[in-house]
Amino acid sequence: MASALLTSSRVLVAVASALAVNSQLPTRWGSMLGHVLKPTVDFAVLPVRTPVYRLAVDLGGNDQPTGRDDPPATPEQLRDRYDAALVRIDQQQQRIAELVRTLELLQGVREIEQPDTTPLSAKVTATTDAGPRVVLTLNRGTRDRVAPGMTVVFKSSVVGRVIEPVGPSSADVELITAHRAGLQVRVRRGPDSIPYDNIRAQRGDDGRTFTADVARDLRIRPGADVLLADAVHYPDARGRLLGVVENIVDYEPDPHLLQRLIIRPAVDLRALREVAVLRPDPPASAAQPSDP
């Protein structure tokens, strides 16, 4: 049987001959002939492109062209990246939960009837730590209509109260953890639960926390929000966050019926750098100038 007229060897010889002739022709003719021969050359080398590419990949260690010289990631590196991504996702979810809780607390504050106040931002210039009595010094004073007894807050949390004396451009604030008398509070187990009223919080022995004795059947768990409900000492801060239940222990005199809540402020009150003073709004008659 006669051999095929067009074989790979004959094609390669023809291409080589054509290239040799092309090199001896004038530039214009060579360019025209090159345009004619290019499809033929592409067709001739098509069967060897894939094997050559695979051989180059094998010799290069199975590296894919990524535009960088970085080696491919190992399984351990991929697992580390996956774990890091999970950590970032968890941090974002916690941040979202904190923002949702802050929004709910602020909404609860607006629903409680209390005196009308306007927050005045102030910077903390000094902190005096004398055991249980911690005093923050602010850069606001009588020039800004700051007076003793005004409540100081940080976002949705209660910080303390302005104490005497108040200078023209400075004022001292005693932290709420130094409050010696008991405070009426409300404990909320979750965002959709009804807060428990008639709970009294006392200053803890360490001067940094509060304690509250409650019945066991209330089933309060660590992490529950503790809201201020005192209408005597802090009437303009009712509904704001006093702290969070950090731990629950047995009430030693009667452990079968009562539990003791350990309440820690939601923020580090001794490390604040900026707060807000709740200044009472002037009466409407005083705010509007009288007619001549």
Image (cartoon, grey):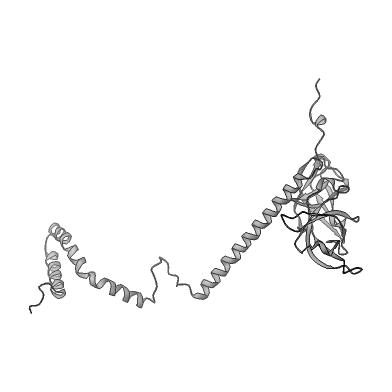
Q: Quadrant of the N terminus?
A: bottom left
Q: Is residue 191 above or below residue 284?
A: below
Let me know if residue 227 appears in the view.
Answer: yes
The image quadrant of residue 25 is bottom left
Q: Is residue 257 above or below residue 234?
A: below
> In the figure, is residue 66 to the left or right of 93?
left
Q: Position of residue 278 (x, y in %)?
A: 79, 44
Of residue 98 and residue 51, the one placed in the foreground of this image is 98
Of residue 126 and residue 230, the one placed in the foreground of this image is 230
Q: Position of residue 204 (x, y in %)?
A: 87, 62
Q: Quadrant of the C terminus?
A: top right
The image quadrant of residue 207 is bottom right
Q: Position of residue 285 (x, y in %)?
A: 82, 29
Q: Position of residue 85 (x, y in %)?
A: 56, 65
Residue that appears at 15% across and 60% down: 36
Residue that appears at 60% across and 63% down: 88
Residue that appears at 9% across and 77% down: 3
Let me know if residue 121 appears in the view.
Answer: no
Most distant residue in the bottom direction? 1
Of residue 222 and residue 146, the one placed in the foreground of this image is 222
Most distant residue in the top direction? 292
Most distant residue in the front direction? 217
Residue that appears at 85% across and 62% down: 215
Number of numbered callouts drawn:
0
